[in-house]
Amino acid sequence: MSHSPSPSSDTDSSSITTVEQDGGRIRQNGSQSQSPGMVPEYSRHWRDVFWLGIFIIHLISLGAILGVLGINRFQKADRLDIDRFTTKWVKNKKHLTETYWPFYAAAAGVGTFLGGIWLSLLGSKANQMMKISVHILTTYLAVISVFCFWGHQILWGVVFAIGATLQLLYVISVIERLPFTMLVLQKAVKLVWNLPEVMRVSYAFMCIMLLWMVIWSFGAAGIVAASMGDSVDDSLCWWLLVALSVSLFWTGAVLCNTVHVIASGMVFLVLIHGGREAATMPSKPLVKSLRHAVTTSFGSICYGSLFTAAIRMLRWEIRGLRSKIGSNECLLCCVDFLFHLVETLVRFFNKYAYVQIAVYGKSFNHSARDAWELFQSTGVEALVAYDCSGAVLLMGTILGGLITGTCSGLWAWNKDRDRVVMVGFTAMLMGMILVGLAMVVVESAVTSIYICYAEDPLLIHRWDADFFNQISEMLHQRLQHRSSTARDVRFNERVQEAVPI
């Protein structure tokens, strides 16, 4: 059993013991356990340097390409005389870069505004905003799907309709988890709200992202200006935009995860030392976290940013589908195979790695493996699997991107209807990245809370005793649920073996 201390019993806090059945989690009492703050820090060597080099080369080369594509149609069509190389695939028009560049300026403005609103309302209305994200996203996707069908964009109508369906199914599959998820998010917001310097870092990185988007949108506007709208010859321009979108996604993920590492380092220190004003807090912790994030650990951030987001989304969808399959053994077998495959990938690519990177300066794969083994050995993985705070924050990010894409798309609809899908798609991605930079500070706090709880539950108890009791009770429930499920599976297997064929 898991015995949680009474909130009123402060004298017992030094002898808290958390024990898990069947999960193997046994914590020594607080006076004997080793605080994470006392663990020797890894030497701050440069990690994953190869991926750092790849990212920098990618930025430099792509920046040059974007500049050429934008300048080629800036104020004069085919200024650099490069259209002759593309006439085999694209029938170029005489449109100019500055015709479409304002659409992306509007996307950047709307995305920045939404991200700024999120950060400004973080302390007072964040919980309501997250609830809105969960419940409004499905409707918004469905409405956009209808408008796409109405505008004869059948493919995109089908895409958004499938997105609305998957979103609805996912929300239905995790509806019982949302109260606990909102509790964790509320505590994470409380933690971040008391660290205004972390939010200033998020604002600063939004400005950095805006500077890169100026260059990126300049080249993207040049591609859109060279396209033929909905014609078959437009495929090359679409492939170029997709390639640019992948690049922008990676760049945005790198900046988001850099903020993630900085914020995680700060939150972890606050929880370890019992508050930012504690006498044991190191001097200038934010400066140190920032320096490590943009130097020795930046290669690990670049590496993890390539894979982590896609694997997380796949894991959420498979978990939701797996919980609603029922007794269809054939389908369950296929989904279980995918589930175990994704779980193996999660071992090496998970968002909790960034906390280990921030605190210990490990490589990404080393950090991800250590974080996952920590959760597995302590049983906290059952709690992490039940929580869907990352999915809720992603819903808010997607909603922000959709609003941004809608605003730019409506403007493009009035100016040039052939370019609505191109402009709307790329503007949506820009909005998602800008809003994601605002939301990542909350996710950093969530991951740090779970890592600290797995390292030493007393850290959470010292910070918030009521929250410690709630999270410990939920962990106890999840482990009991897993234990009973495992017993049922073993019983059914024995029954099937006993029944003669």
Image: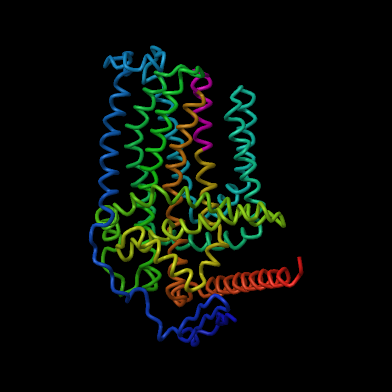
Tell me where residue 227 appears, x and y as whole percent.
43, 19
Q: Above or below — where is 10 with respect to 122?
A: below
| 195 lies left or right of 59 | right
Residue at image location 50% in from the left, 39% down from the top:
401
Dividing the image into 4 quarters, which one contains the C terminus? bottom right
Q: Is residue 210 above or below residue 420?
A: below
Q: Quadrant of residue 355?
A: bottom left
Report the magenta residues as a range. 402-419
Who's the residue at 65% across and 46% down the image?
168
Q: Percent x, y for residue 365?
A: 36, 59
Label count reads: 0
Quadrant assignment for the N terminus = bottom right
Q: Is residue 310 rendered to the left or right of residue 83?
A: right
Q: Residue at x 57, y 55 (%)?
A: 337
Res 200 visible = no
Q: In x, y percent, where is residue 393?
A: 51, 51
Residue 422, compared with residue 305, is above or below; it is: above
Q: Is residue 219 above or below residue 404?
A: above
Is residue 356 something that shows in the picture? yes
Q: Residue furthest right?
A: 500
Residue extending furthest toward the front = 501
Magenta segment: does it hold 403?
Answer: yes
Q: How is the image coloured?
A: rainbow
Q: Main secondary structure of the magenta part?
A: helix
Q: Nearer the viewer, residue 465 or 94?
A: 94
- Location of residue 268 in the rendering, given as x and y in whole percent from the top left corner: 38, 66
